Amino acid sequence: MRLIIPFLLLVYCLTQTSGITIEATPGTSDGVVQVVLNQTVSLRCDSEADKELVWLRNGAKIDLKEENKKGSSHVCVSPVIHEDNGATFTCYLHSNASDTASVTLNVTYHPLLSGSEEVKVEEGETLVLQCDTRANPVLLSISWELNGSMVDLLADGFTVTSDGVTSVLRASKVEKSVHEGTYKCTTNSPSYGHSSKLFHVTVTEKTKKFPLMPMIAGLVVVFLTTLLAIVSRWKKIAQCCK
Ligand SMILES: *[C@@H]1O[C@H](CO)[C@@H](O)[C@H](O)[C@H]1NC(C)=O
Ligand SMILES: *[C@@H]1O[C@H](CO)[C@@H](O)[C@H](O)[C@H]1NC(C)=O
Ligand SMILES: *[C@@H]1O[C@H](CO)[C@@H](O)[C@H](O)[C@H]1NC(C)=O
Ligand SMILES: *[C@@H]1O[C@H](CO)[C@@H](O)[C@H](O)[C@H]1NC(C)=O
């Protein structure tokens, strides 16, 4: 109790001396506004005096209409996007920048994985599958399965890379017997649970690439030989007619 009472008094004093307050919808807790992706956040800044207010988003001034500056000022984020996560909105008096209040957005979102995709890959080529893994709070896990079993990274030439935005499964030199089948990527979020997407992968036969350049070279040789033959033959014929 001895510790708590001075702390409460301090908080009380701080809110009393500052003339600027921010009210947020949805509400704030400890200066953080909890909001789900695509929702709207509405912020209102009030000053005791009927004075001009300034709003900043991550330190950059927000353009306000003349009628939205004096005494009370509104800003609105609609809809909230991924990039708004962690953004700080600050309000202060134009005449006194030391009297300030701010709130930070905590935008929660998770990968919207669903449905299935048909993928065709030629034998010997590289298979690349991708899943969106952007999430707040961060995912507990990301997994890749082939025909219901975990993809064997060591045995079958697979690699998985994740950069927090996408998870990429790669298999180089694809073989029909090893790589064809149904792949599933699954993400597990602490707030939203599991989300999955399927990929039906078909490995097609290697198509015979038409050897165009050697063909052209061959044709040129045939043409030149014929031409030479005709020319030399023509000389003989011409000589004979002299
Ligand atoms: C958010 O909006 C975008 C674009 O309208 C949409 O594609 C996406 O599915 C929405 N996400 C959520 C979680 O509602
Ligand atoms: C600016 O605001 C702070 C905090 O409210 C206050 O202590 C200070 O006296 C003000 N300065 C002026 C010049 O009004
Ligand atoms: C943001 O919200 C998530 C989900 O409620 C929570 O786990 C996380 O700690 C919050 N982050 C911050 C910085 O408040
Ligand atoms: C996965 O299942 C499909 C359909 O049963 C089968 O054709 C394919 O060979 C299987 N793939 C692997 C790698 O076992």
Image (spheres, grey):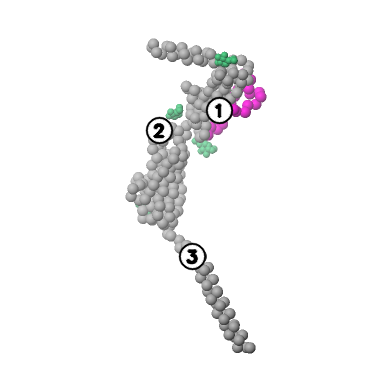
Distance of label 2 from label 1 (alpha carbons): 32 Å
Magenta stretch containing residue 68, yes or no? yes
Displayed-image quarter of ligand 3? top left
Q: Residue at x 41, y 36 (%)?
A: 139
Mark 1 or mark 2, which is nearer the start of the sequence? 1
Q: Earlier in the sequence, mark 1 or mark 3?
A: 1
> Secondary structure under badge 2?
loop
Q: Which residue corresponds to mark 1?
A: 59
Residue at screen point 57% across, 29% down: 60
Instruction: Mark 2 and ligand 3: say if the CB distance to the nearest ligand atom is below 8 Å.
Output: yes
Residue 178 placed where, x, y %? 36, 53
| Amino acid carrying mark 3 in the image | Pro
Question: Where's residue 133, x and y in %?
Answer: 44, 39
Numbered range of the magenta stretch: 61-81
SS for callout 3: loop
Q: Residue flagged by tag 2: what amino acid is it?
A: Pro
Amino acid on which disc 1 is placed: Gly
The tag on residue 128 is none
Compare marks 2 and 3 and give the one earlier in the sequence. Answer: 2
- Looking at the image, which is closer to me, 129 or 27? 129
